[in-house]
Image (cartoon, rainbow, N blue to C red):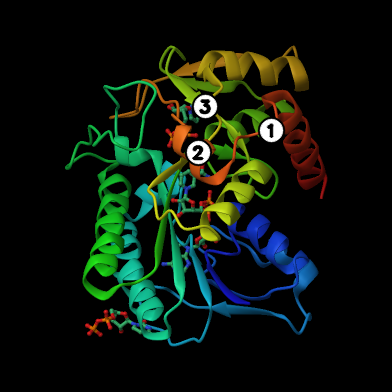
Amino acid sequence: MRILVTGGAGFIGSHLVDRLMTEGHEVICLDNFYTGRKHNLLKWIGNPYFEMVRHDITEPIRLEVDQVYHLACPASPIHYQFNAIKTVKTNVMGTLNMLGLAKRVKARILLASTSEVYGDPEVHPQPETYHGNVNPIGIRSCYDEGKRMAETLAFDYHRSNDVDIRVARIFNTYGPNMLPNDGRVVSNFIVQALQGKPLTVYGDGSQTRSFCYVSDLVEGLIRLMNQDFIGPVNLGNPDEYTILELAQTIQDMVNPNAELAFEPLPQDDPRQRQPDITRAKTYLDWQPTVPLKVGLEKTIAYFRDRLAE
Ligand code: NAD
Ligand code: UDP
Ligand code: UDP
């Protein structure tokens, strides 16, 4: 198949492109390189079945493909808040353009949505039927509400124009190819520990997240794309940790002498988060297989090499 991956030069996108290329597909990567880098896909450059297109998805583009994995959007709070209006445009106008493209060429399109559609959840763990608790006017809203609108657009294109959609709600995912300055918690703690700097714990560290290793996530995306259930489907690892537990785990693994520095909790930071993955188990026969420590080992090794460059 010929497959378009928007945001293919980013963290998750680059692992997805690796899988699709290895499986023998023809892949087009669309990226504006805001938080992605060509380096993540260096091994495919020059391969006749791979194309890298520098393009901003807020502008229309015409391409002929069989499937679209639509991942383009900065995912780290510091990057999506840097230009909040642009984040809304990417989620709304960008998703509209990709749905328009999928409609024109009758391609199946998978939207990478997020657990952030649940906001600061009052239901725990979060099933897909939960409608969420999102602040519409806060500093996270450009991303949370942007993704909610992207889901709305996907379902309206499905109902009105028969577009063949799939919607994944991705929970916190980590692994190699994250930027050292990505700003999300796993990469921050690892880079800080490797550099002998204090690990910056926001708040008292009692807030929780559930961390999924990227190879598990990519397997879930591919399964969702290639079966009949349109979703939304939660994809994430149900093993839940406090941020303080994560800091201590990384401290133990990298540098037991590293200090912890407690910093203010950002506005609207969700208190707890854990996916209910019953749907993914039922429809996709999918569940994560990589334990946190194993995934962290691989991620630490990656950053050790990156920082030595
Ligand atoms: P990332 O920031 O590493 O990758 C995003 C990619 O999209 C980058 O390569 C960036 O350059 C590109 N991009 C951004 N805006 C663009 C635009 N207007 N036009 C073209 N390209 C653009 O993020 P990631 O962690 O790989 O996340 C990928 C997708 O998965 C995102 O849609 C994100 O919202 C979603 N997601 C990720 C997580 C996670 O924990 N990693 C969790 C939930 C949802
Ligand atoms: N679009 C695109 N590539 C295509 C087809 C459409 O970028 O191959 C854009 C198009 O420019 C429009 C959006 O997708 O801005 C929605 O397209 P649709 O056909 O649904 O709406 P219309 O063009 O009728 O407003
Ligand atoms: N966090 C932290 N230190 C950091 C970066 C993040 O304590 O250096 C916290 C953050 O406040 C949040 C959790 O870790 O409670 C996850 O943050 P991240 O930005 O990785 O993802 P999200 O909040 O979008 O789930």
Local SS, label 3: strand
Q: Residue 266: in sight, yes or no?
A: yes
For the residues labelled 1 and 2, say whether their Cβ atoms are less than 8 Å apart: no
Of labels 3 and 1, earlier in sequence is 3
Residue type at numbered disc 3: Ser
Give me the disc on residue 282: 2
- Horizontal side of 112 relative to 65 (left or right) equals left
- Horizontal side of 204 relative to 292 (left or right) equals left
Residue that label 1 marks: 289
CB at mark 1 closer than 8 A to ligand 1? Answer: no
Q: Nearer the observer, disc 1 or disc 2? A: 2
Q: Nearer the viewer, residue 114 or 109?
A: 109
Of labels 1 and 2, earlier in sequence is 2
Q: Residue at x 54, y 14 (%)?
A: 244
Q: Nearer the viewer, residue 35 or 93?
A: 93
For the residues labelled 3 and 1, say whether their Cβ atoms are less than 8 Å apart: no
Q: Position of residue 208 (x, y in %)?
A: 45, 20
